[in-house]
Image (tube, helix red, strand yellow):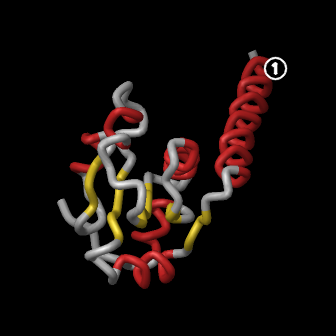
Amino acid sequence: MKLQKIIFLILALALVKIDLTYAQSSGVKAISVSEFEELAKNKGAVRIIDVRTPEEKAEGHIANAINVDYKNDNFKSEIAKLNKNRTYILYCKTGIRSGNAAAIMKAAGFTHLYSLDGGIEAWQEAGKPIEK
C-alpha cells in the first residue's frame, strides 16, 4: 500500500513536470502579476481570458476576463472565434492550464499571447482584487 502511494506520487509529479515543460517550450511568455497589470491597462487591444471552468470562475475572477474553458471539448472552436491579431493574457488557477491553452492558441495562429505565471493564486497572493 505504501509503495502504491509512492508510485502514484511519482507519476503525478512527472505529469505536472510534462505539463510545465510543454507550456514553457511553446514559446508563450509567462508574465508576472505586475507585467500582467501593465499589459491589461490597454483595454482596447488586450483581452483577458480565464481558461478555468465556469464554476471556478464563479468563485472569483480578474476584472474584465472572459471565460473560455480549456477543459471543455469546444475550446478550440471557441478560440477560433477570436481575433488572432489581438493580444491575449490567459490565466487559470496556477498557470499550467493557461500555458497549455496559450500553446494551442499559438499553434492556431495567434501571435500575441501571455500566460499569468502562478495564475489567479499568484494574483491573490499579491493582494490584487477579484470579482465575483
The answer to whether 115 is drawn above or below residue 5 in the figure is: below
Residue 130 appears at what percent x and percent y?
Answer: 27, 68
Q: Quick one: label 1, few (<14), some, or many (20+) residues within 10 Å?
A: few
The number of callouts visible is 1
Circle 1 SS class:
helix
Residue at 81 percent of width and 20 percent of height: 3
Q: In this figure, which residue is indicated by the disc labeled 1? A: 3
Q: Residue 32: x and y, percent? A: 55, 75
Give me the residue at 38% from left, 64% from top.
Answer: 86
Q: Looking at the image, is 125 positioned above or below residue 114?
A: below
Whether residue 120 is visible:
no
Q: Point out the image quarter for the C terminus.
A: bottom left
Three-letter amino acid code at the position of disc 1? Leu
Q: Nearer the viewer, residue 80 or 96?
A: 80
Q: Compared to 8, does 59 lie above or below?
A: below
Residue 118 is left or right of residue 84, and the answer is right
Q: x and y percent of residue 93 in the render? A: 45, 52
Q: Is residue 46 above or below residue 108?
A: below
Residue at 43% x, 70% y: name it.
Answer: 123
Q: Position of residue 90 (x, y in %)?
A: 44, 58
**Residue 80, picture quadrant:** top left
Q: Residue furthest left?
A: 132
Which quadrant of the rendered structure holds the N terminus?
Answer: top right
> In the image, 81: left or right of 15?
left
The one nearer the camera, 1 or 20, is 20
* Visible residue check, residue 40: yes
What residue do we see at 73% from left, 39% from top? 18
Residue lying at the far top of the rendered structure: 1
Instruction: Using the image as rendered, state which of residue 11 and residue 91 is in the foreground.
Output: 91
